[in-house]
Image (tube, rainbow, N blue to C red):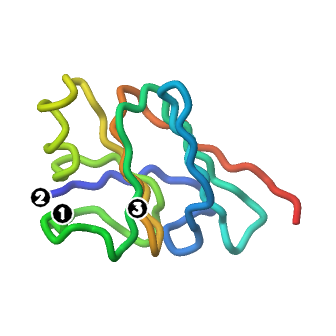
Amino acid sequence: MVNYQAIPIEGVSALNSQLAGIKWNDGTLFVDFSVMDKPLIARATIRECLIFRVLTDSAVPQLELEDQRGLSEEHLAYSVEGAFFYGHHVPTVFESPVLHYRFVTGPSLVDALSRTDPVIRTLGVSK
């Protein structure tokens, strides 16, 4: 069973956001999501990121379509427990403590394993 704990971001949901960019620099992952109905970017900054992946709906392996609790279209960001991605890498590759975060939009999914919580903020953009 995969348990999702939502990380609320005011005005941002899985339905109104889209992956806009991703950058990994010196162990820090920056993930930007455009908010389609507002002039905003939601940016997640994850320091001490050990590994990450980006998938589209069509690329999620059947093995990873686990029984899920707490996943909702109302949220973009989650803390996750019990997912295959975590179990595959921890403790075989990385020693604990490692945290698993997942960002879900309609067409994409970003997983990140890190030693710290993400800092998520919204940034205004001019059109």
Q: What residue would you read off at disc 2?
A: 1
Residue 25 shown left or right of residue 101 in the figure:
right
Counting from the top left corner in percent of width and height, residue 97 is at 24, 24
The residue that appears at 36% across and 74% down in the rendered structure is: 57
**Which numbered dot is residue 64?**
1
The N terminus - image quarter: bottom left
Q: Earlier in the sequence, mark 1 or mark 2?
A: 2
Q: Which amino acid does label 2 sit on?
A: Met
Q: Earlier in the sequence, mark 2 or mark 3?
A: 2
Residue 71 shown left or right of residue 118 in the figure:
left
Residue 99 occupies quadrant: top left
Say what secondary structure mark 2 lies in: loop
Counting from the top left corner in percent of width and height, residue 106 is at 46, 74
The residue that appears at 16% across and 52% down in the rendered structure is: 84
Tag 1–tag 2 contact (CB < 8 Å) = no
Q: Which amino acid does label 1 sit on?
A: Glu
Task: Residue lying at the far right in this picture: please name it.
Answer: 126
Label 1 – label 3 distance at C-alpha: 12 Å
Residue 109 shown left or right of residue 95 in the figure:
right
The residue that appears at 19% across and 23% down in the rendered structure is: 95
Q: How crowded is the residue under tag 2: few (<14 C-alpha within 10 Å), some, or many (20+)?
A: few
Counting from the top left corner in percent of width and height, residue 47 is at 49, 28
Q: What residue type is labelled 3?
A: Leu
The C terminus - image quarter: bottom right
Give the mark toward the camera: 2 or 3.
3
Q: What residue would you read off at disc 3?
A: 109
Say what secondary structure mark 3 lies in: strand
Residue 55 occupies quadrant: bottom left
